[in-house]
Image (cartoon, rainbow, N blue to C red):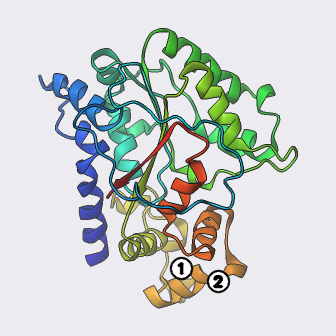
């Protein structure tokens, strides 16, 4: 119970940045104008915009092998931006994406922001299928097996970028699965970051911002442990939504929850690592925080990397 409360509080604290853009809005509230000013200041620059975390760091990822674009985004630029929010996991990504889903229409019409990231159906307050994209199809097929130019997901992304840039719309693409995205594809050994940046830069030249969230490591570990032991499919506490492994007592074949110590032993075992954990193992091998690892990984494959402090 304590861990659930802690993670809930931690998630709500992300209102400091992206979440505060929309958390005060009600579906029918007259506060939409706040959205325009907040979203432009917090994500797309402006005089009150700030980057927290690792601006002065000298760490460079060993996987950072090619500089694509050295120029940083001007804080006075009024041109539309492309924002790629990559998480990582357990940094309030679901909370952010739920609200971005809920207020897609208001964002588009009032703040000139198109949200094309992960959609949560239970967060939709109205059906709006315009400018939707499935980021997982890019990550799970295109960026693993290569040949992106032939994939429908890649063509859809380019089509959306072409339309939205022509209509002067900011774009937010949010999915924590980008954190586990393969750096290179299996078949072609193509640098996926470079390929994605080149596509975005075609329509948003010099205006691609990658957003990474920093969370204190010990809080992050507790949140991961809580997620690992969570008995509900969607975490909503509905007893009818129990995962199959939690529907019986351990003595009857059900799952036995890990203690935090046993969880950490399993989690730290390099032999048992999953693809989704690879970025964490790489960060640990290089003795840097995960957020710093991603800052180094993307700094030369974007116009700017912004680290936000959870």
Along the line of sight, the residue nearer the viewer: 123 or 44: 44
> Secondary structure beneath disc 1?
loop
Please give the name of the residue rendered at 47% of the width and 20% of the height, measured from the top-left corner: 129
Along the line of sight, the residue nearer the viewer: 17 or 144: 17
Residue 246: % across, % down:
48, 73
**Residue at the extreme right of the image, as rendered:** 187
> Secondary structure beneath disc 2?
loop
**Residue at the extreme top of the image, as rendered:** 167
Residue 258: % across, % down:
49, 84
Whether residue 22 is visible = no
**Total labels drawn:** 2
Which residue does the numbered mark 1 point to in the structure image? 255
Please give the name of the residue rendered at 63% of the width and 34% of the height, measured from the top-left corner: 197
Q: Quadrant of residue 19?
A: top left
Q: Residues within 10 Å of mark 1 (few under 14, many from 20)?
A: some
Picture layout, residue 30 above or below residue 16: above
Q: Earlier in the sequence, mark 2 or mark 1?
A: 1
The residues bearing labels 2 and 1 have C-alpha atoms spaced at a distance of 20 Å
Residue 45 is left or right of residue 9, and the answer is: right
Q: Look at the image and tell me in which quarter the C terminus lies.
A: bottom left
Along the line of sight, the residue nearer the viewer: 274 or 242: 274
Q: Nearer the viewer, mark 2 or mark 1?
A: 2
Q: Quadrant of residue 68?
A: top right
Residue 274: % across, % down:
67, 68
Q: Which mark is residue 269?
A: 2
**Contact (Cβ within 8 Å) of mark 2 with mark 1:** no
């Amino acid at each position: 119970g304590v861990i659930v409360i802690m993670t809930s509080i931690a998630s709500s604290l992300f209102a400091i940045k992206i979440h505060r853009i929309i958390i005060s809005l009600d579906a029918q509230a007259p506060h939409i104008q706040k959205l325009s000013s907040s979203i432009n200041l917090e994500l797309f620059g402006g005089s009150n915009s700030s980057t927290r975390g690792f601006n002065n760091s000298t760490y460079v990822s060993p996987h950072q092998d090619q500089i694509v674009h050295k120029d940083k985004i001007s804080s006075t630029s009024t041109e539309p931006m492309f924002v790629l929010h990559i998480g990582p996991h357990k940094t309030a990504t679901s909370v952010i994406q739920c609200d971005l889903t809920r207020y897609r229409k208001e964002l588009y019409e009032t703040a000139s922001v198109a949200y094309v990231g992960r959609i949560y159906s239970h967060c939709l307050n109205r059906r709006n299928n315009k400018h939707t994209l499935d980021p997982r199809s890019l990550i799970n097929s295109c960026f693993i097996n290569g040949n992106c130019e032939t994939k429908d997901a890649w063509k859809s992304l380019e089509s959306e970028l072409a339309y939205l840039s022509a209509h002067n719309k900011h774009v937010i693409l949010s999915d924590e699965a980008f954190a586990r995205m393969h750096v290179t594809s299996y078949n072609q050994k193509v640098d996926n970051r470079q390929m994605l940046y080149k596509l975005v830069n075609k329509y948003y030249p010099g205006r691609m911002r990658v957003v990474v969230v920093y969370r204190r490591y010990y809080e992050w570990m507790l949140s991961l442990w809580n997620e690992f032991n969570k008995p509900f499919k969607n975490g909503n506490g509905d007893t009818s939504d129990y995962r199959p492994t939690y529907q019986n007592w351990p003595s009857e074949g059900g799952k036995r929850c890990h203690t935090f110590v046993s969880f950490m032993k399993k989690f730290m075992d390099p032999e048992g690592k999953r693809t989704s954990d690879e970025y964490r193992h790489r960060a640990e091998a290089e003795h840097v925080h995960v957020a710093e690892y991603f800052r180094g990984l993307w700094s030369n494959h974007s116009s700017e990397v912004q680290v936000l402090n959870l």
